[in-house]
Amino acid sequence: MAGLGILGLTLTPVYLVMAALAGVPGLGFRVKCVYLAIRLWLKRQAPMDLKSLLLLVVFPLDSTRYFEMDVLWRALVQGNSRSHLDVSSPRLLFTLYLMQDPDLHSELVNPDKADLAETEKLIRACGLMPRCKLHSCLISKVPFAPGSFDTITSMSVLEHIPEDRQAVQKMWELLKPGGRLLLTLPCAAEASEQYIDRNEYGVLSQGEDGHVFWQRFYDTELLRERIFSVTGEPRNSKIFGERSPGLFLRNATRKRTDRYYPFWREPYMVAREYCFFESVEQLPGEGVIALEFVKP
């Protein structure tokens, strides 16, 4: 596996250049991940392990995360937030956001204790704990008063919550007037739900058939019913998805089964197999929608 890491370090710049020429989103955020790895490598206190640092350089993002990180990051840095709540997003988003703004304070909510422990490790290594508090609970159980936050972020989380509308209502309640809610969600021309035979996060209960709710894909009707009925129409939205049905599943399956998966190709793969769409109805297969709401 050491040889695979060396190969990845060698080929990563080549595929990043190819991805940039092909117009893939998220490369600016990807560069920030490299800078973060270098910073942590040079630090002497609370060091990160070598494998984690290597992943920050060669494989910090995959598939639609390039789009999601790009669009949420751009929205975050254009705002003026001092109080921020994140609901279980990938840890790189809020870590780099905290590093970007020294006056920002964040509250992080994540019911997955194992994932939260990894988040705490990274936050400590970056010296951000004085401005960041971690909470191992569901969004419905957070200890915050209404109108507490300027900004709330949640990347690809709501689809895993059976009571998604109630979760949106809680986030909306926690926003100050004029505050922004930034979400990403999986979407498709036709809504659907997925169930799996394992309890991935240890939060939900198994059904009688032994399966656990995994996620839903939102179509336009479901977005209106579960999200817009609470927030109103979004101020901004963008849609990114696979060019042909099955590309996402093929790639995800290969990552799970191929120990020699060429992770250095990921950004170029995204550039070739995904693109932007004008509407959810145009999606030929799976996609992701990014939404920005402003509370009146």
Image (cartoon, grey):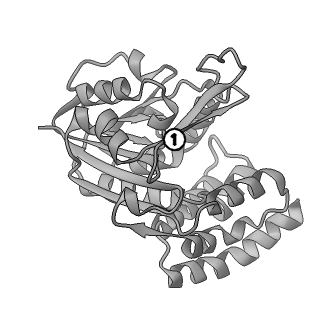
Q: Residue furthest left?
A: 296
Q: Is residue 19 above or below residue 279?
A: below
Q: Is residue 201 above or below residue 249?
A: above
Q: Position of residue 251 (x, y in %)?
A: 69, 60
Tell which of 114 and 181 is nearer to you: 181
Q: Position of residue 52 (x, y in %)?
A: 70, 50
Tell which of 103 and 113 is nearer to you: 113
Drawn side of residue 15 relative to residue 226, left or right: right
Residue 83 showing in the rendered view: no
Three-letter amino acid code of the residue under disc 1: Ser
Task: Residue at 83%, 52% (x, y): give it.
Answer: 257
Residue 129 showing in the rendered view: yes
Task: Residue at 77%, 58% (x, y): give it.
Answer: 254
Tell which of 150 and 241 is nearer to you: 241
Q: Is residue 60 above or below residue 158?
A: below
Task: Residue at 59%, 62% (x, y): give it.
Answer: 245
Residue beneath label 1, please? Answer: 192
Q: Residue 6 occupies which quadrant of the picture?
A: bottom right
Secondary structure beneath disc 1?
Answer: strand
Task: Residue at 41%, 23% (x, y): give it.
Answer: 139
Q: Position of residue 129 (x, y in %)?
A: 47, 33
Q: Position of residue 179 (x, y in %)?
A: 20, 39
Q: Residue furthest front?
A: 190
* Position of the C terminus by quadrant: top left
Drawn side of residue 108 relative to residue 105, left or right: right
Q: Is residue 52 above or below residue 119?
A: below
Drawn side of residue 98 relative to residue 20, left or right: left
Q: Residues within 10 Å of mark 1 (few under 14, many from 20)?
A: few
* Position of the N terminus by quadrant: bottom right
Tell which of 74 and 43 is nearer to you: 74
Number of callouts in the render?
A: 1
